[in-house]
Amino acid sequence: MQWQELFEKLPAGEKAHVFTTEAKRQYALKNFEIAAEFRKLAKEAKQSES
């Protein structure tokens, strides 16, 4: 099983956590555009959780 398949099976809250963590990591690495994309994905995942 590929990581993408495992990721798709995660609950929305867990996906949001993964996206938020990756956004913080990318921000620390000064990859601001990538960090912004992960923040957007985290926001979408949190909204779909509700």
Image (tube, helix red, strand yellow):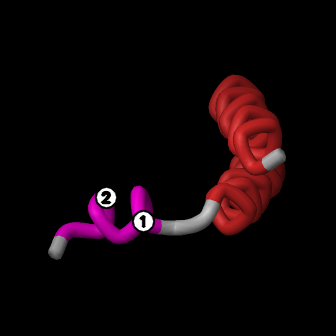
Q: CA distance from mark 1 to mark 2?
A: 9 Å
Which image quadrant for residue 38?
top right
Dominant SS type (magenta):
helix
Q: Position of residue 34 (x, y in %)?
A: 64, 32
Range of magenta residues:
2-9
Q: Position of residue 15 (x, y in %)?
A: 63, 58
Q: Residues within 10 Å of mark 1 (few under 14, many from 20)?
A: few
Q: Which residue is mark 1?
A: 9
x 67%, y 67%: residue: 14
- Tell me the amino acid under the disc marked 2: Gln
Numbered-mark total = 2
Residue 25 in view of the camera: no
List the single residue furthest toward the front. 50
x 52%, y 67%: residue: 10
Q: Which residue is mark 2?
A: 4
User: Is 2 or 37 nearer to us in this picture?
Assistant: 2
Q: Is residue 44 magenta?
A: no
Q: Position of residue 30 (x, y in %)?
A: 77, 40
Checking the image for residue 25, the label placed there is none
List the single residue furthest toward the bottom. 1
